[in-house]
Amino acid sequence: MDINDLRSIVTVVSLLTFLGIVAWAWSRRNRARFDEAAMLPFADDPADASGRARQGEQQ
């Protein structure tokens, strides 16, 4: 085994890892969670995103 074999193995492993991440990111099972996370920057109150009210507003 020389350095070119090692480079080929690393390239194939990297490609498979990339394709696995792409498949995970585009899976329908994760869509709701990713859509919710995508809307977090637009939430008025950070507590709104988690469903809890701020303690100062309850008094």
Image: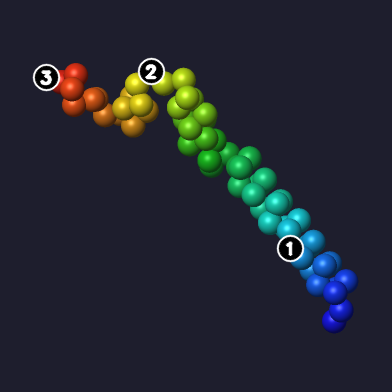
Residue type at the position of mark 2: Asp
Q: Please determine whether, in this image, residue 12 is positioned above or below residue 53.
A: below
How many other residues sit within 10 Å of disc 1, few (<14), some (14-19) or many (≥20)? Answer: few
Q: 30 left or right of 6? A: left
Q: Please determine whether, in this image, residue 44 is positioned above or below residue 51.
A: above
Q: Nearer the viewer, mark 2 or mark 1?
A: 2
Residue 51 at x, y percent in the picture: 30, 29
Picture quadrant where residue 53 is located: top left
Residue 58 at x, y percent in the picture: 15, 20
Q: Earlier in the sequence, mark 2 or mark 1?
A: 1
Q: Residue at x 61, y 47 (%)?
A: 24
Marker disc for residue 44: 2
Q: Residue at x 48, y 32 (%)?
A: 37
Marks 1 and 3 in Cβ contact (< 8 Å): no
Residue bearing the label numbered 3: 59
Q: Please determine whether, in this image, residue 46 is positioned above or below residue 20.
A: above
Marks 2 and 1 in Cβ contact (< 8 Å): no
Q: SS for tag 1?
A: helix
Query: Front-most of 13 and 23?
Result: 13
Q: 19 left or right of 33? A: right
Q: SS for tag 3?
A: loop
The C terminus, quarter of image: top left
Q: Is residue 32 visible?
A: no
Q: Residue at x 53, y 40 (%)?
A: 30
Residue bearing the label numbered 1: 13
How many other residues sit within 10 Å of disc 3, few (<14), some (14-19) or many (≥20)? Answer: few
Q: Earlier in the sequence, mark 1 or mark 3?
A: 1
Residue 13 at x, y percent in the picture: 73, 63
